[in-house]
Image (cartoon, helix red, strand yellow):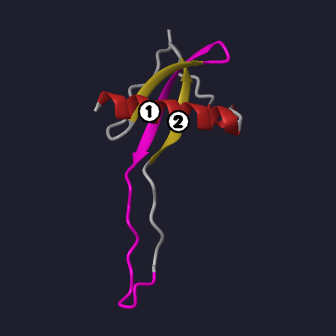
Amino acid sequence: MNTTPVCPPGFIEFACTVEGVDLVCHLEYIPSEYGSQDSMGLLYEPDIEQSMDLVNAYVAGTDIDIAHLLLQYVVEHITIIAFEDMKNDH
């Protein structure tokens, strides 16, 4: 029997149900970064808000990764609720 792969080090595991399918997701947390400025105060790089990127979305209890099949709004929904869940745990 196939089982869901272990979450890689440095990633965050998040279980959820989307459209009636139980998923085990692996996400990468991206912390905030503040862009650097030159001596005149002009930005070299813009600020980046903290966020999460969906890396894998396994059907629970399997090694079937459907992340590449998910519509963008589903991916955004997963990353938003996973991010909120992470913030509430800290």
Q: At 65% across and 31% down in the image, what residue appears?
A: 74
**Marker disc for residue 80:** 2
61 in relation to 39, above or below: above
- Return the residue nearer the eye: 77 or 69: 77
Residue 42: quarter of image? bottom left
- Return the residue nearer the eye: 48 or 68: 48
Q: Is residue 50 left or right of residue 19?
A: left
Q: Residue furthest top?
A: 1
Residue 70: quarter of image? top right
Q: Secondary structure at mark 2?
A: helix
Residue 49, percent from left and from top:
45, 55
| Start-end of magenta stretch | 18-42
Q: Secondary structure at mark 1?
A: helix
Asked if the residue at tag 1 contacts the one at tag 2, i.e. Cβ–Cβ closer than 8 Å, the answer is yes
Q: CA distance from mark 2 to mark 1?
A: 6 Å
**Marker disc for residue 65:** none
Q: In the image, is residue 21 part of the stretch drawn in magenta? A: yes
47 in relation to 70, above or below: below
Q: Is residue 6 left or right of residue 56?
A: left
54 in relation to 22, above or below: below
Residue 80, percent from left and from top:
52, 35
Residue 22, percent from left and from top:
56, 14
Q: Residue under circle 1?
A: 84
